[in-house]
Image: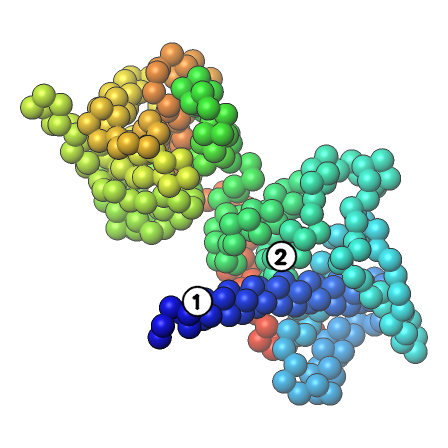
Amino acid sequence: MNEQYLEAVKIIKTAILRSQNRAAKYSNKEMLSLYYAIGGYVSNNSRKGTWGTGAINEISLRLREELPGLRGFSATNIKSMRLFFEAWQPYFQTPTTALENTKSTAMAVDLQHIKVVSIENAPNRLPATDDFSVDTFSEISFTHHIEILNKTTDLDERLFYIRECALNHWSKYALRTRLKEDLYHHQGALANNFAITLPEDKQYMQAIKMFKDEYLLDFINTEELDVSDPQDIDERVLEKEIISNIRNFIQCLGSGFCFVGNQHRIEVDGEEFFADLLFFQRDLKSLVVIELKKGKFKPAYLGQLNFYLSALDEKERKNGENPAIGILLCREANKSVVELAIRDYSKPMGVATYRTGDELPKNYEVLAPLIEEIPKLLNDAEIEGDGSNE
């Protein structure tokens, strides 16, 4: 094809992709609007005793009989629509139009016109809603919304996950991982010296957001490693397990991390030194060293990490890259001790802790079987109701 045709293909392709993107956003917005309206209708009738026990199951079954091939309207999903409405209705001002029914009225809601209630008029104070964008709200799927609603209760936390989902285009599996890690409470909580070692505001803010104070390495189970006490896990064993599950570990770290290698060799005047794990962080444009320690944090560990960072900056840092960053990953750490020990070092460093799969909180262990079932329940496949009380 000549260049003129190639240019035409490029232009048409761009137009198609943009149109598809707009169509997908519009379709999702319409779907959320429909589910919100149905949720309100079901809530008004089922919560006030208008409908009897088992009504949702019966309605779901009849809908699928009258609309063969209908998907996404199992009894479980209809209850999820009710949850969706009840969770957000207190915070939205919704213009109501009528979808008249013989016995009652369902709200038809246009998400374009949903506005967050002002702080003064809201039932509860909503400090995080000033920048709550309806466009962002409607960019994530109903499945994502239900995942968030089922695992969080705080409004600020819900808005955080909605924004992060939309911004980072998380799949439902990535969202589940972030919820399980409790990212909301751990992001930005890392004990560090970034404020004095990363003088540029943009890089400092990126670094603060990039690293967490605790990492859940749930792909490592010490019981399977024949380690009676998680505290006894050897650093080399931990490193080996991380390397064997490097994709999972990178997912724990977050987006933009590229694995360079483990036991990375650094030579200084004929002497060899080996950093446990080395990554490159694309957003920060920095090498990131992660040193593993099996026990409790000790201030002496920082001296070794600081040396690695100095050596990497001198020997391996390329033009255009920012200074290397170090993360010390320990079993446990006293944050006050860490902050006192780290503040006088000249290289950017932070100290985080980790947990393994057999250290999940007891309440998570109880809920784990239910959480594992959620993907099945939220699928658009037809799922029969369990006949339980509404």
The quarter of the displayed image where residue 389 is located? bottom right
Could you tell me which secondary element the residue under label 2 belongs to? Answer: loop
Q: Amino acid at mark 2?
A: Glu
Q: Nearer the viewer, residue 371 or 253?
A: 253
| In this rendering, position of residue 104 left or right of residue 370 | right
Query: Which residue is at a point 74% across and 67% down the rendered structure image?
Result: 34
Task: Identify residue for label 2.
Answer: 139
Query: Which residue is at a point 61% across and 52% down the rendered structure image?
Result: 148
Above or below: residue 275 compared with residue 68: above
Residue most toward the right?
Answer: 103
Q: Residues within 10 Å of mark 2 (few under 14, many from 20)?
A: many
Does the image show residue 241?
A: no
Point out the frontmost of discs 1 and 2.
1
| In this rendering, position of residue 183 left or right of residue 276 | right
Q: Earlier in the sequence, mark 1 or mark 2?
A: 1
Task: Identify residue for label 1.
Answer: 7
Q: Which mark is residue 380?
A: none
Could you tell me which secondary element the residue under label 1 belongs to? Answer: helix
| In this rendering, position of residue 219 left or right of residue 380 | left
